[in-house]
Image: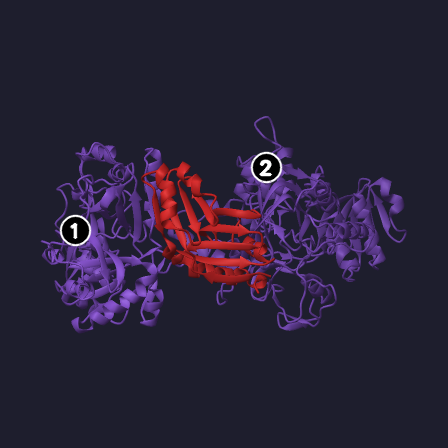
Chain colours: A purple, B red
């Protein structure tokens, strides 16, 4: 703890050694710690173990912090989250008065019609509820994730947990012992703490035991895996066995007024008095049905509390301190007070009696904290210590069943009357157990209620509500540890682009130049002179082995067995449903091998497909993913041949390197495979080269092309260039159920082949009319095409399609696009509207339909 | 503490039948990627390896793929705790394995406290950054 005061709603609160935020606030006179979720009832300290929601406050801008288990520190900024204008004087408390008008299931029954009503109501409800605003102006903290492996994980480091850890270590196992607190830190001085300290010493001296304090177990997953979280890290523990030694919580008793500030569970009251030296009240009533309750009674008295009465069983009478009135076998009926506890009503030998008090301390039984075990399906899990106890059933006399969600026993009765009978269904309907405490306080009471009301119609009256992770409130950034990161892929030219001042952006997991200076100028460089683009993001695969042709013939819908070495062909990969999953360029090599280039975003999928089908068909094929190893530079434009020719002595004329085709070249001293491609609609060479030679090759091309007006170009220019050619971007222009026919790519399918993946589906689909297709769109009345992307295409009032790509074409001086359109009663439409613009359906390509420029 | 070094490895990919791969799987620096693939890390004679495997699998591919890989070495007593921040894989005392490290498919060579992580060049910078961020307290 850091010495010094913290700030609480505009004033200073002194912190003493060992204080939690709650103990410091309580010592400073704070009694209302929060307002309840829906009814805005005052809530004070209750469990003292971090289970219930009552003490939740906002600390340093983070809402929902359990103040009873959070060490106080100087300089903290503490506020109460709910309440308007303040938690002490909350006008929204009117919701409590309206509770009878908002029965259980209120939100499921109300504002359903008219539909707009919910949207309005939701805004009001959201403002009036919640745990306080989330900090939106802070950076996202990064939580480190790490993995740990052990034979046995012991969750809980009390006497039972420490003992279990030692026992496992003695058998030679590697043990991981964890607890959400520091060992022994929650115990008041006494025999229990002494025993814990003795065991702790032995555990710390055992090398086979790794100790993780202040790490809360969040759940149990396959493996078994137990994720543990603290403020700085998420530890995924994979173990052979799980020992649950999480102890027990004190029973949450149901009686009218059970949520009033001043009603305490025994452990909280005893810790406040004995650990922090703050009396819980001036006149205290204790209900002690267990030996632990007697200990709490003694601790309170020893700390100087004035315990005016103790309700105890006859067997404990002699243990009650003489200054305290012992009420034998009395029954607690009600707690009374407005906003805070003023008195309790007890039944004593048939007589009803009121006792004035400002603190009521309950220690009436234990419920095992066995949530981890209840999550297990077949995992090897063992409960030890109090976690293995048979639960003491709580009394069900009225009041609040679920403190988190403001669900009363009356609500549960009403839900049952409406036909919701089992604990699980009651939970879902009433939302009891679904708050931040995840049922730690109320799950047992709900189960007891369901069982108590069960009759022959109930199939599983004993079933407890399902437990779901996380068992402890956990920050989203902790849950996202190890999975939230974006893996940035870089080509070998990344540093070159950065040095050139390119504006980089994300594309299929790669960081790529969007443009260098002026994308329009980059476009014109390609159309009129020559441009360079880094296309090292393309997937590249070597397919070798005696069955390589068989595999390519199976995976791709077009014919491949007639492809001679040096030639290449556009190929489509389909799934078994006949839907397009990827496309690429297949280049035949000498010796029956192939080099395949696939889309940048589809490389991993293509790799998996090739390997999967090689295995499924039992082919002798070797597939090598060369994406990372090879760089690639696209040299495109009317002067592309001049530029490449200036740096190579190899022949690259149309006869030596035809379209579509490829060959090995040495360009500027770099060994390359040059592939003629047509994606941008100009004469173009893709120079695939060893990644490490990329910067040298790029620089040589820049230098040699200076007099030709060479310019690098980025994705923005590429988008325009390919759209003018009507080329499809898979993903952007396509839908998951697009067949080649829908995309106008039937030319890439050879239905005369005996078999390929998806052929059977295409045969079936061929019998059905084409109901949707991707079409070229020529817009009239739209100055700028980019604004049309995503716009619905309408025919009259009906939406019959959507624009998937749109740009203003410099070549046509018109806005053009692609979009899918639906067939109407009279066939496919010829003219539609996209907002204010008219969209005429036209064939593609828009630019150089005869491919004259591509063929060069 | 562990020392982090980034270097450019020499990697030769051998794609061949399982039987042929078995023949080179025990070479120093060998990492068995799959039954039909072995990655050889370090200077090896491509021709000599090819001669061995082609005898058993005439279609075998032996290729220098060094440009495709980046290497990061964690060395020292803190190397294993540092590795645990990056991967859930359980490391042997010595040997090789493949699996996910920093959410990237990696080939891993282990020699006691020295762990060589081979990752595709395109994500090598990401892995380096991730090691530096998540293992900062364990690095020298």
Residue contact at pointers 2 and 1, CB within 8 angstroms: no
Front residue of A114/A567: it is: A567
Q: In this view, does A786 lie above or below A383?
A: below
First in sequence: mark 2 vs mark 1: 2
Q: How far apart are marks 2 and 1 (CA)?
A: 58 Å
Labels 2, 1: one chain:
yes
Q: In which quarter of the image is residue A34?
A: bottom right
In-image side of A301 versus A556 (left or right): right
In-image side of B37 versus A595 (left or right): right
Q: Mark 2 lies on which chain?
A: A
List the residue tagged with mark 2. Answer: A379
Q: Which of marks 2 and 1 is in front?
A: 1
| Residue A302 percent location from the top left of the image | 85, 57
Identify the residue at horizontal 50%, vertical 58% (top origin): B73
Crowd rating for badge 1 (residues with CA inside 10 Å; few <14, some 14–19, many 20+): some
Front residue of A753/A374: it is: A753
**Residue A240 visible, this angle:** yes
Q: Is residue A206 above or below residue A552?
A: below
**Residue B34 visible, this angle:** no
| Residue A304 percent location from the top left of the image | 84, 60
| Residue A674 percent location from the top left of the image | 22, 56
In-image side of A583 versus A482 (left or right): left
- Residue A1: mark: none
| Residue A673 percent location from the top left of the image | 24, 55
The total of numbered circles placed on residues is 2
Front residue of A366/A262: it is: A366
Q: Which chain carries label 1?
A: A
* Helix, strand or loop for disc 2: loop
Give the quarter of the figure containing the C terminus of chain A.
bottom left
List the residue tagged with mark 1. Answer: A660
């Amino acid at each position: 703890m850091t010495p010094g005061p913290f700030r609480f709603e505009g004033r200073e609160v002194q912190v003493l050694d060992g204080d939690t935020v709650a103990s410091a606030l309580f010592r400073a006179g704070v009694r209302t710690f929060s307002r309840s979720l829906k009814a805005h009832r005052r809530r004070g300290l209750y469990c003292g173990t971090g289970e219930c929601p009552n003490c939740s406050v906002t600390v340093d801008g983070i809402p929902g912090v359990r103040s009873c288990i959070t060490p106080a520190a100087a300089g903290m900024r503490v506020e109460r989250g709910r309440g308007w204008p303040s938690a002490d004087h909350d006008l929204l408390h009117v919701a409590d008065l309206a509770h009878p008008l908002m029965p259980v299931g209120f939100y499921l029954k109300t504002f359903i019609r008219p539909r707009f009503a919910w949207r309005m109501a939701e805004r009001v409800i959201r403002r009036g509820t919640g745990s306080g605003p989330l900090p939106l102006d802070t950076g996202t903290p990064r939580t480190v994730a790490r993995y740990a492996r052990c034979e046995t994980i012991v969750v809980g480091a009390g006497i039972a947990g420490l003992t279990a850890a030692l026992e496992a270590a003695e058998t030679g196992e590697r043990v991981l012992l964890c607890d959400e607190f520091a060992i022994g830190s929650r115990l008041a001085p006494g025999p229990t703490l002494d025993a814990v300290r003795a065991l702790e010493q032995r555990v710390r001296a055992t090398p086979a035991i790794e100790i993780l304090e202040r790490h809360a177990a969040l759940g149990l997953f396959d493996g078994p895996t137990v994720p543990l979280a603290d403020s700085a890290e998420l530890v995924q523990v994979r173990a052979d066995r799980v020992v649950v030694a999480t102890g027990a919580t004190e029973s949450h008793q149901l009686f009218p007024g059970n949520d009033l500030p001043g009603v305490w569970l025994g452990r909280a009251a005893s810790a406040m008095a004995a650990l922090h030296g703050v009396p819980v009240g001036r006149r205290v009533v204790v209900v002690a049905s267990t030996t632990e309750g007697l200990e709490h009674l003694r601790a309170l008295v020893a700390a100087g509390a004035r315990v005016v009465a103790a309700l105890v069983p006859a067997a404990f009478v002699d243990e009650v301190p003489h200054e305290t009135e012992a009420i034998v076998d009395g029954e607690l009926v009600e707690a009374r007070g407005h906003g805070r506890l003023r008195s309790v009503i007890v039944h004593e030998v048939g007589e009803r009696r009121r006792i004035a008090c400002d603190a009521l301390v309950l220690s009436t039984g234990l419920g095992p904290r066995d949530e981890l075990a209840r999550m297990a399906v077949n995992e090897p899990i063992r409960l030890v210590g109090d976690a293995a106890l048979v639960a003491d059933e709580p009394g069900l006399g009225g009041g609040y069943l679920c403190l988190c969600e403001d669900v009363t026993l009356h609500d549960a009765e009403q839900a049952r009357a409406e036909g919701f009978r089992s604990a699980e269904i009651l939970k879902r309907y009433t939302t009891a157990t679904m708050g931040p405490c995840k049922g730690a306080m109320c799950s047992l009471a709900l189960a007891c209620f369901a069982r108590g009301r069960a009759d022959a119609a109930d199939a599983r009256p004993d079933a407890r509500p399902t437990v779901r992770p996380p068992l402890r409130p956990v920050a989203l950034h902790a849950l996202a540890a190890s999975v939230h990161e974006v893996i940035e892929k870089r080509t070998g030219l990344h540093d070159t682009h950065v040095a050139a001042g390119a504006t980089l952006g994300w594309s299929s997991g790669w960081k790529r130049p969007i443009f260098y200076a002026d994308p329009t100028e980059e476009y014109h460089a390609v159309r009129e002179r020559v441009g360079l683009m880094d296309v090292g993001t393309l997937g590249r695969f070597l397919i070798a082995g005696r069955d390589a042709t068989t595999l390519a013939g199976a995976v791709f819908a077009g014919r491949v067995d007639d492809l001679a070495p040096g030639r290449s062909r556009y190929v489509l990969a389909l799934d078994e449903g006949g839907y397009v999953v990827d496309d690429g360029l297949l280049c035949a090599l000498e010796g029956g091998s192939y080099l395949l280039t696939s889309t940048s975003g589809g490389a991993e999928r293509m790799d998996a497909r090739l390997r999967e089908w090689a295995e499924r068909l039992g082919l002798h094929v070797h597939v090598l993913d060369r994406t990372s190893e090879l760089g690639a530079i696209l040299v495109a434009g009317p002067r592309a041949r001049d530029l490449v020719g200036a740096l190579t002595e190899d022949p690259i004329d149309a006869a030596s390197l035809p379209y579509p085709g490829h060959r090995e070249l040495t360009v500027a001293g770099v060994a390359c495979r040059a592939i003629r491609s047509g994606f941008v609609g100009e004469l173009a060479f893709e120079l695939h080269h060893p990644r490490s030679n990329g910067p040298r090759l790029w620089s040589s091309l820049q230098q040699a092309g200076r007099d030709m007006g060479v310019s690098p170009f980025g994705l923005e220019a590429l988008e325009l260039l390919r759209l003018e050619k009507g080329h499809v971007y898979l993903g952007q222009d396509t839908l998951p159920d697009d067949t080649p026919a829908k995309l106008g790519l039937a030319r890439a399918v050879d239905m005369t082949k005996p078999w390929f993946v998806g052929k059977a589906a295409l045969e079936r689909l061929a019998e059905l009319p084409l109901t949707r297709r991707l079409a070229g769109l020529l817009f009239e009345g739209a100055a700028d095409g980019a604004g049309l992307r995503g716009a619905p295409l309408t025919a009259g009032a009906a939406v019959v399609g959507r624009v998937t790509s749109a740009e203003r074409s410099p070549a046509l001086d018109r806005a053009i696009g692609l979009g899918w359109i639906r067939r109407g009663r009279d066939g496919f439409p010829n003219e539609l509207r996209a907002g204010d613009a008219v969209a005429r359906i036209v064939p593609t390509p828009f630019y150089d339909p005869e491919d004259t420029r591509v063929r060069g | 503490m562990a020392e982090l070094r980034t270097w450019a490895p020499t990697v030769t990919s051998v794609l061949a039948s399982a039987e042929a791969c078995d023949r080179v799987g025990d070479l120093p620096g060998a990492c068995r990627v799959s039954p039909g693939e072995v990655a050889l890390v370090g200077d090896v004679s491509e021709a000599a390896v090819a001669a061995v495997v082609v005898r058993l699998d005439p279609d075998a591919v032996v290729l220098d793929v060094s440009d495709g890989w980046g290497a990061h070495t964690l060395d020292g007593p803190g190397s294993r705790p540092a590795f645990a921040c990056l991967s859930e894989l359980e490391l042997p005392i010595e040997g090789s394995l493949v699996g996910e490290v920093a959410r990237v498919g990696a080939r891993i060579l282990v020699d006691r406290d020295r762990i060589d992580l081979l990752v595709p060049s395109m994500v090598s910078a990401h892995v380096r950054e991730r090691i530096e961020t998540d293992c900062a307290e364990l690095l020298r």
